[in-house]
Image: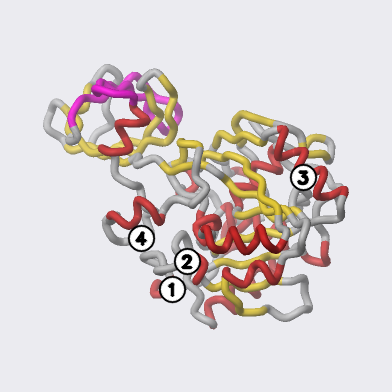
Amino acid sequence: MKKSDFHYDLPEALIAQAPLAERSASRLMLVPPAPAAFDDLHVRDLPTLLQPGDLLVFNDTRVIPARLFGQKATGGRVEILIERLLGGQQARAQIGASKSPKPGSRIQLDAGGEAEVLGRDGEFYVLRFDIPEPLESWLVHEGRLPLPPYIHREPGLDDRERYQTVFARQVGAVAAPTAGLHFDEGLLAQLRERGVQFGHITLHVGAGTFQPVRVDDLSQHVMHREWLNVGAELVEQVRRTRAAGGRVIGVGTTVVRALESAMREGELQPYAGETQIFITPGYRIRSVDAMVTNFHLPESTLLMMISAFAGKARVFEAYAHAIAQEYRFFSYGDAMLLFPQGGEGAGDGGDAASRPG
């Protein structure tokens, strides 16, 4: 299987540069199994599409203002994008500089304080920050929000709120779980009234989610690592939902990545740790019965994942429809409610192609 198999042409004008005024006003394409027709709806229509007893699973990660700027002792400018907080005032980060900094070198931060380069961790650097308060809280007021590279503007004050989900709790992501951005308190209240249940996992979305696949042969691609937690309470919610005949709907690819990483011998189990799972067509996603998901970049691992779920031909047919109907794409764009091809969902069995770690 090749990266080029997942290419499509997208007019640049369809890449959403800012959120809509109302979260749930985004459009929602209903993508049932073929040959049923697509339906052009809105996210606020979700309560009519879900059934009492269904379980929506959200990712409750919270985005860190993870971008910093500074300069080396030589005067060279440096851009830092924190990828993961490590504790003890340390973080793993990407560094953009004219020349790679060496271990022991120090970066004077524009926001005050310094960062010492302790060493490399693969393509990342490990930094230790000399700042007057804990790194996590310091970043809240001194860091800058790392909007995705396809949003061609500087982040504004509104982005501090709109690039977080309303249920964001666990600090640690450098990118938002964007399908969750469509849910506001009003929509959540309507879903509760409908009898829909809510569950949460945590997956801290890393900077690797924006890195392009650099090889055409997908068997040679090295997937990025992300930390997740699928708790015992969520596992029990899923068990009860299935036993009562309800459906499990993952809100976003990060939820599906977390749940699939926690599958053991066909059963969802509590799991906390890293995952490097890479899901492509041929892999059977068994943890969810439907997905709410945004529209993803050409040749991206996220597009490959949803193609594994609903079938590549069906996904590309849906994307062609979305382009023709001028849906808004990517992080601040519209969404789809996606069902597996032929009604195949969780519990159908099949062997996992990849495991956490």
Say whether marks 2 and 1 touch (CB < 8 Å).
yes
Q: Name the residue under label 4.
A: 151
User: Upstream in the sequence, badge 4 or badge 3?
Assistant: 4
Provide the secondary structure element on which disc 1 rests. helix
User: Upstream in the sequence, badge 1 or badge 4?
Assistant: 1
Q: Name the residue under label 2.
A: 333
Q: What stretch is highlighted in magenta?
A: 112-134
Crowdedness near tag 4: few (<14), some (14–19) or many (≥20) residues, C-alpha within 10 Å: some
* Residue under the point 77% across and 38% down: 236
User: Upstream in the sequence, badge 2 or badge 1?
Assistant: 1
Image disc number at residue 238: 3
Work out how far the residue at label 3 is from the one at label 1, CA to CA, in angstroms. 36 Å
Provide the secondary structure element on which disc 3 rests. helix
Work out how far the residue at label 1 is from the one at label 4, CA to CA, in angstroms. 12 Å
Q: Name the residue under label 1.
A: 14
Q: Quadrant of residue 251?
A: bottom right
* Residue under the point 71% across and 57% down: 196
The scheme the figure's colours follow is: secondary structure
Work out how far the residue at label 3 is from the one at label 2, CA to CA, in angstroms. 29 Å
Amino acid marked by disc 2: Gly
Work out how far the residue at label 2 is from the one at label 4, CA to CA, in angstroms. 11 Å
- Answer above or below: position of 35 versus 216: below
Provide the secondary structure element on which disc 4 rests. loop
Which quadrant is home to the C terminus?
top right
Between 44 and 352, the one lying in front of the other is: 44
